[in-house]
Amino acid sequence: MEVGSLKIAYAPGKVILFGEHAVVYGQPAIAVPVTQVQARATVEPGSEGQGITIVAEDLEQSYSLEQAPPSDALRAIVVSTLEHIGVGTKHDLAITVSSTIPIARGLGSGAAISTAIVRALSQHFGNLLSPQTISDLVYETEKIYHGTPSGIDNTVIAFEKPVYFVRDQKIKIFSVKRPFLLAIADTGIASPTKIAVSDVRRAWKREREKYEEIFEEIGTIAEMGRRAIERGEIETVGRLMNENHRLLQLIGVSSPELEGLVEAAREGGALGAKLSGAGRGGNIIALVTQETRSRVDLMLRLAGAKDVIITEVS
């Protein structure tokens, strides 16, 4: 989008439908975009000599690229994008970012912000990048947020399609035969992705055989989930969500708050429900129908959900 010399770009959120944590260990995962929430980035010329200024509206922060440490994720994605398109960092620009995606809730807020920045900068310099290139650039920045990222956030957000993902393999965008509805309920508690991933890795090192067996089961569920979605077998998707959640409980990434919302969703008539993302906070997702969406929404809010988003996967 272009408004005069102002360039504006957006990127959606995402949820993992199947395969979280196991995806880090080579198992498949499925993620879908969530367009009801979005990150926004604008790029416009700055005053002469100001250099590149980054304004993070939601955090009420404003700083120059030169002042930011190398570990700053916004600085990192700006620098890597400008270097990739071959224009360098010696420009007078104002880059402003904002987002309606809750932070640290497993909705891909960091990857969405980075994706929006890449898109806006590439528009500004007239060098539009492919979704794969954007995904690759954002992946490097994801290491700052998550330590050992799976690569799924940057992939599904850059392509904005349901994605079947196996680490170090070519991504697969697949078709949804029968659109379905997900209720995404927020515990209101930050999900510490880097900590949760590190804790699981330590447990895996202690009990490798046990954890790899669980990861393989989760991977099988993701494979079955893809087939069910491609065939329009929505009830099967719900059953697989329940089983995936049970396995995530076994690796210790659930919490009382997540369990309360999963139980409430099922009591409200959801076909299936599970935590989504790193766990220990963040969101649960529930598979609902047009007939059950209102009741599930109500039950989730009564159970303490801070917010509920209903999104269609198609």
Image: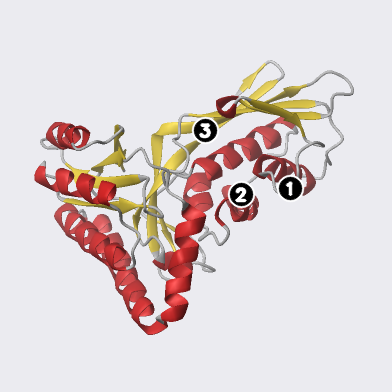
Q: Residue furthest right?
A: 49
Q: Which residue is mark 2?
A: 138
Determine whether 104 is above or below 201 in the image. Answer: above
Crowd class of label 2 (few under 14; some 14 to 19; many from 20; radius 10 Å): many
In percent of the image, x 14 and y 54: which residue is there?
235
The amino acid pointed to by label 2 is Val
| Marks 3,2: beta carbons within 8 A | no
Q: What's the amino acid at mark 3?
A: Ala
Q: CA distance from mark 2 to mark 1?
A: 9 Å
Q: Is 121 situated above or below 1?
A: below
Split into 4 quadrants, where in the image is the C terminus?
A: top left
Question: Badge 1 is on which residue?
Answer: 80
Along the polypeptide, which appears first: circle 3 or circle 2?
3
Q: Quadrant of residue 282?
A: top left
Q: Which residue is mark 3?
A: 39
Q: Residue at x 14, y 50 (%)?
A: 271
State the residue lying farthest toward the front: 256
- Report whether residue 53 is seen: yes
Dot 2 or dot 1: first in sequence order is: 1
Tell me which amino acid carries mark 1.
Ser
